[in-house]
Image (cartoon, grey):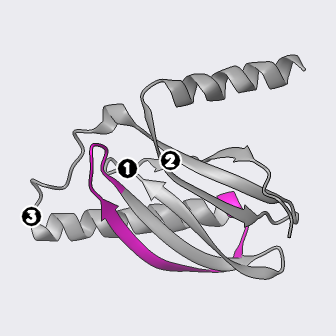
Amino acid sequence: MRFFFISLLLVAGFEASAAEPVLKFTLTKADGTPAVYEFFVPSDDVNQSDATLSRDEAVQRQHNAGVAALAWAKQFYGAHEIFLRSVELQEGPVPYYLAKFDGELAGARQVFFAIVLPSGLVVQPVETGQALSK
């Protein structure tokens, strides 16, 4: 119980301080459990925009974000036959790269995501709840 309470405080503290929710989605995890994930990007990473980069530098940064996202997604989701479908820069107060994948997970093809900051840091999603089973 103590561990749960401390974990809850850490997650709540992270969400309350300097973080913007940017994506929420559901999937069935490799063990068959439905889950809801939410990505929060740190709002203090706002000076990482690609606005001042040359075209070649912006393309290279997008490529690097895709490589980092794919490596992270393979390990985090535990999916097989993963395909990276897109990597797009999302502008706004907090820019980030949104990588979209599909892969074999829990016996079905599913869509899932990764978020990479312009600094190259991959953002860990927070499991915000358990999805309702169909």
Element class at badge 3? loop
In the rendered structure, which disc, 2 or 1, sits on the residue that comes first in sequence? 1
Query: Considering the image in quadrants, where does the N terminus appear?
Result: top right
The crowd level at tag 3 (other Cα within 10 Å; few <14, some 14-19, many 20+) is: few
> Taking 67 as reference, is 88 left or right?
left
Q: Is residue 90 magenta?
A: yes
Q: Which residue is mark 1?
A: 117
Residue picked out by circle 2: 123
**Which badge, 1 or 3, is on the more N-terminal residue?**
3
Residue at 20 percent across and 65 percent down: it is 58
**Amino acid type for the residue under numbered disc 1:** Leu
82 in magenta: yes
3 sits to left or right of 58: right
Instruction: Return the mark for residue 54.
Output: 3
Q: CA distance from mark 1 to mark 3?
A: 18 Å
Q: Tell me, yes or no, whether the two marked residues, 2 and 1, touch with CB atoms within 8 Å.
A: yes
Q: Earlier in the sequence, mark 3 or mark 2?
A: 3
The reply to whether callout 3 and callout 2 are in contact (CB within 8 Å) is: no
Q: Residue at x 86, y 16 (%)?
A: 2
Q: Is residue 42 left or right of residue 118?
A: right
Question: What x and y, as percent, mark residue 112?
Answer: 60, 68
Q: Residue at x 68, y 20 (%)?
A: 9
Residue type at mark 3?
Ser
In the displayed structure, would residue 29 be above or below residue 6?
below
SS at mark 2 in the image = strand
- Residue bounds of the magenta highlight: 76-96
Q: Nearer the viewer, residue 61 or 134?
A: 134
**Residue visible at 59% across and 49% down?**
38
Whole-number angstrom distance, CA of label 2 to CA of label 1: 7 Å
Q: Quadrant of the C terminus?
A: bottom right
x and y percent of residue 35 in the render? 76, 56
